[in-house]
Image (spheres, rainbow, N blue to C red):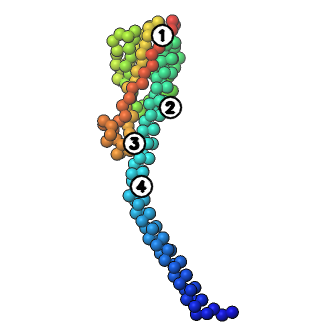
């Protein structure tokens, strides 16, 4: 059976109709690419912001844990963690415990200590040269160990929202010294 002329016309018309949407879809692909080009920077900025702030919160929690563990160690009066075992000092052992528990973040947060003994005047220890043997008090004293930290924000655009580009935070623990 040979196709008739009317049958061929109908076949050509249906092919022509089906070809038009394909060209229209190709144009839509360009629009989708253009829309993605406009939206992608905003999405990447939000993603970086969420990751940067999440990292800052993780650092805050890690340092809180390190200070709590350091305070728990301090109230026992031990000195066995002091790197200088020939003449161990309690305060160096406590600081070493905080360093050990901070998962390597201790030196990155530029810590400075504020220690208050028996709700008296607080003493700030911003450098290791200002540490003293009496900085964690005596048996029975209530000690508040606070560390002020500064975490550098990683994303350049996020840095502009923080003073100096650092997320500044404080972590503290309060405990009573044991009778050692």
Q: Quadrant of residue 36?
A: bottom left
The residue furthest right is: 1
- The mark that comes first in sequence, 2 or 4, is 4
What separation in Å lies between label 1 and label 2 (alpha carbons)?
25 Å
- Residue that carries the numbered disc 2 in the rendered image: 103
Q: Mark number for residue 154?
A: 3
- Residue that carries the numbered disc 4 in the rendered image: 40
> Residue 178 or 54: which is nearer the viewer?
54
- The mark that comes first in sequence, 1 or 2, is 2
Residue 108 seen in this snapshot: yes
What separation in Å lies between label 1 and label 4 (alpha carbons)?
55 Å
Give neighbour class at mark 1: few <14, some 14-19, many 20+ (Cα, 10 Å).
many
- The mark that comes first in sequence, 4 or 3, is 4
Q: Please name the residue shown 47% across and 18% down the image.
A: 71
- Residue that carries the numbered disc 1 in the rendered image: 177
Looking at the picture, does residue 17 appear above or below residue 88?
Answer: below
Q: Quadrant of residue 145?
A: top left
Q: Position of residue 77 (x, y in %)?
A: 50, 12
> Residue 18 or 113: which is nearer the viewer?
18
Q: Secondary structure at mark 4?
A: helix
């Amino acid at each position: 059976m040979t196709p008739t002329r009317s049958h061929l016309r109908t076949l050509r018309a249906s092919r022509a109709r089906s070809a038009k949407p394909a060209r229209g879809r190709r144009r839509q692909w360009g629009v989708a690419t253009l829309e993605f080009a406009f939206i992608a920077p905003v999405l990447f900025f939000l993603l970086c912001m969420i990751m940067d702030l999440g990292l800052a919160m993780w650092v805050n929690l890690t340092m809180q844990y390190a200070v709590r563990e350091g305070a728990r160690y301090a109230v026992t009066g031990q000195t066995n963690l002091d790197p200088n075992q020939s003449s161990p000092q309690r305060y160096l052992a406590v600081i070493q415990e905080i360093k050990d528990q901070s998962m390597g973040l201790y030196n990155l947060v530029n810590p400075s200590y504020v220690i208050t003994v028996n709700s008296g005047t607080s003493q700030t220890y911003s450098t290791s040269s200002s540490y003293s043997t009496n900085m964690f008090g005596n048996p029975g004293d209530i000690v508040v160990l606070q560390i002020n930290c500064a975490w550098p924000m990683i994303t350049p655009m996020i840095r502009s929202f923080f003073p100096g580009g650092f997320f500044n935070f404080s972590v503290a623990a309060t405990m009573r010294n044991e009778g050692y």
